[in-house]
Amino acid sequence: MVEPPVKCTNLGCNQSYLASENNDTACHYHLGPVIFHDIKKGYSCCNRVVYDWDEFQQIRGCQVGAHSDQKKDTNFYKSNTVSNAERAIQREETNKVRSIEDFEKEMEEKRRKEAENKKTQEKMPVMKDGLYVCANFGCNKNFSLEENIEGSCHYHSSGPGFHDVKKFWTCCNAEAWDWDDFMKLPTCSIGVHKVKYK
């Protein structure tokens, strides 16, 4: 009786094999996870990324071992864009009327941050043409400490998010597709400049 070939389930192998010929050096595979982002395709285990599907299929495995027919879960690489988007959704859900306990926690956190800021001021600030550089997201302005008053800084309260070719701020609904348009999106917060440190 002829032995039927078995399809290897190791990531990136794509070969059929005979169980009688399987050994510890028969299979070249990837540990993964697989990366599919924008038009990039690849494997995070060996940092190989290509743009063409045929080239992706031909990326040789970075691990050597025996073929396997065990079913495996396929894990996909998650970029920080996904976590930024999830944080933006969570932030929307938390924009509700707060209790006094929540307000007190927030004030305690604010005092803690102010104490941290005092420690941070011991670090070397980034200067440009004799002015401080603002560290707030989306501000990109230089300022002097004397002119740094409430309302002088227009910024975004949290970082940018990027998905495919879409660019957006995770703190508000401002989004754009073109980089120049993204940099010109209106800010959502007003306050004082924050000194950027090296």
Image (cartoon, grey):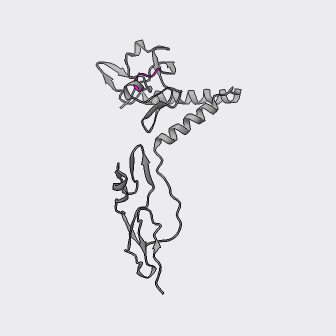
Q: Nearer the viewer, residue 61 or 114?
A: 61
Residue 96 x/y as whole percent: 67, 28
Q: Position of residue 100 (x, y in %)?
A: 70, 26
Tally of numbered discs: 0
Q: Is residue 68 magenta?
A: no
What is the chief secondary structure element of the magenta stretch? loop
Look at 39% across and 29% down and name the residue there.
178
Q: Nearer the viewer, residue 147 or 96?
A: 96
Q: Nearer the viewer, residue 146 or 73?
A: 73
Q: Residue most toward the front?
A: 1
Q: Residue at x 51, y 38 (%)?
A: 84
Residue 89 at what x, y percent from top left? 58, 35
Magenta region, residue range: 182-186
Q: Quadrant where the C terminus lies?
A: top left
> Relative to 109, is 177 on the left or the right?
left
Q: Quadrant of residue 25?
A: bottom left
Magenta region includes residue 184: yes
- Establish if 25 lies above or below 12: below
Residue at figure coordinates x 47%, y 13% from the top left: 149
- Give the farthest residue toward the bottom: 1
